[in-house]
Image (cartoon, rainbow, N blue to C red):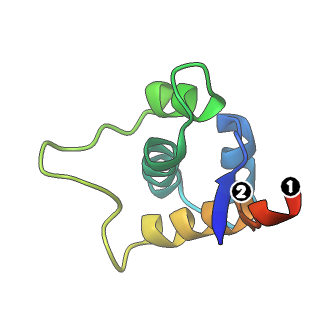
Amino acid sequence: MKVKCDDATREEMLQLLASCGCADFEAEAAIYWFAHDWHGGQGSNLYSAMCTSRYRPGPCEAGVRGNSLAEIAYGLLEEHFVTPYDRSNQL
């Protein structure tokens, strides 16, 4: 089973996380890493969200930290914007 990601805008992601009570710092970190992991190239909304994020990872960071609010927020973004799909139905 493959997955695909909607090309969400920064505003859509901020709105979703704000509706869940996510604090600004955790939301920014989650959006940065979600966009980093799922963007479709320089012309995508997710790439733009990553580039305009106020979050700047440190030199040793490689993703959201485990057991953090940012990790929970990242999971919410995945639940909302990433969907499984079956390519066999498209043949």
How many numbered marks appear? 2
Please state which amino acid type lies under the numbered disc 2.
Phe
In the displayed orientation, state which residue is furthest to the front: 91
Left or right, 56 with reference to 42: left
- 32 to the left or right of 63: right
Q: What residue type is disc 1 on?
A: Gln
For label 1, the residue is 90
Mark 1, other Cα within 10 Å: few <14 / some 14–19 / many ≥20: few
Q: Residue at x 70, y 35 (%)?
A: 9
Residue 78: x percent and y percent? 62, 63
Give whichever of discs 1 and 2 has the lower sequence position.
2
Q: Identify the secondary structure beneath mark 2.
A: helix
Residue drawn at x 24%, y 54% is 62
* Residue 40, position as x, y percentages in the image: 56, 34
Q: Position of residue 16 (x, y in %)?
A: 73, 55
- Pair 1/2: label in front: 1
The residue shown at (64%, 64%) is 2
- 67 is higher (above) or lower (below) than 70: below
Q: Which quarter of the figure has residue 32?
A: top left
Q: Which mark is residue 81?
A: 2
Q: Residue at x 74, y 48 (%)?
A: 15
* Above-or-below relation of 10 to 76: above
Q: Secondary structure at mark 1?
A: helix
Q: Classify the position of the C terminus by image quarter.
A: bottom right
Q: Quadrant of the N terminus?
A: bottom right
Q: Nearer the viewer, residue 1 or 13?
A: 1
Q: Position of residue 51 (x, y in %)?
A: 45, 26
**Marking on residue 45:** none
Above-or-below relation of 21 to 67: above
